[in-house]
Image: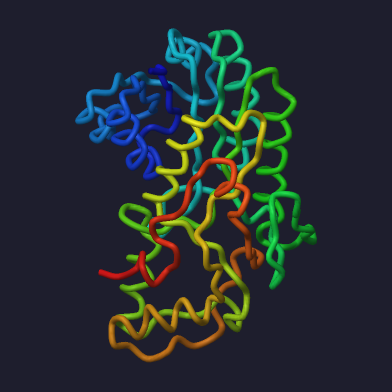
Amino acid sequence: MAEIAILGGNGVYARHLIPRLVAAGHGVRALVRRPEAAGVARGCGADIHIADIFDGDSLRAGLAGCDTCINLATSLPGPSGRGDFAVNDRVRTEGVPVLLESCRAAGIGRFVQQGIALVGGSGASLADEAAIVALDDDHPSAGPVAAALAMEAMVRESTLDWVILRGGLFYGPGTGFDADWVARASVGKLRLPGDGSDYVSLIHIADMAAATIDALTVWPSRETLIICDDTPVRWRELFDFVAAMVGGAPPQAGGRLGFPGFRMSNAKARRMLGWAPFYSDYRAGLIR
């Protein structure tokens, strides 16, 4: 089996992915900035190396002897309050070139890049991997979307054998998003983004990890795949369900519009990977 290096080995995506990789018989090396926080990786018996996406020397040392690199390094803000969009943009535009060169120098053959499905923001139309959202410069997501697209372009132009997995909006254990929705709904503070009419494409974090395992097995070389559930949903429908689940009042409009609506199709991933989400829609994944 492959020896797989995971950059961003402390993140929620990695914490769901590493146990599955180990169970599938792969050797795993977690590349992290804070080894004291690498509890899941350590518990699974993974090697743990200190590395930073901006530091080529640490990356080359951590990648040595591996044949696959999975880049899950992000600094996206979430309900926990950690993360910073400007730093996340730097990770994508300045850090990824350092990582790609380090992979080349270390003899890495295969490279998996975590992407974001919202770069194909499509409003109410069901869109596929060819769709790219057009945003005004003053839109709050213009910078992050541009950085994500620049990152993808650098991966495609590299000499590595790559796969890009564009995930929908993560939810599920450890992500913080659905826990935050439930907490706010329980005290009547859940608000719809705008009027709630925009679509969002979700993916349960366990299904994202399972799709990654399938991608490593099938290896759809040099392909970009959307990994989302089967049921894009309007924010109003989603938050009405959350509020009803906790016995709260329907949420009111007027919340912040953080990113463009995106209604994405997972048909290509289903076809190429033989994958299907276990949680086919938000109602199955949010039950607690």
Location of residue 234 by image quarter = bottom right
Left or right of 76 in this view: 131: right
Looking at the picture, how far across and down is residue 81, in whole percent? 41, 55
Looking at the picture, how far across and down is residue 236, in whole percent? 52, 81
**The C terminus lies in quadrant:** bottom left
Left or right of 170 in this view: 17: left
Q: Residue at x 38, y 32 (%)?
A: 9
Colour logic: rainbow
Q: Residue furthest bottom?
A: 249
Visible in this render: residue 46? yes
Q: Residue at x 32, y 52 (%)?
A: 174
Q: Residue at x 59, y 47 (%)?
A: 271
Looking at the picture, how far across and down is residue 143, in whole percent? 69, 50
Q: Is residue 47 above or below residue 61?
A: below
Counting the numbered discs, the total is 0
* Viewer-nearest residue: 85 or 267: 267
Looking at the picture, how far across and down is residue 213, in whole percent? 43, 36
Left or right of 71 in this view: 19: left
Visible in this render: residue 87? no
Q: Is residue 222 above or below residue 269?
A: above
**The N terminus lies in quadrant:** top left
Q: Is residue 261 above or below residue 59?
A: below
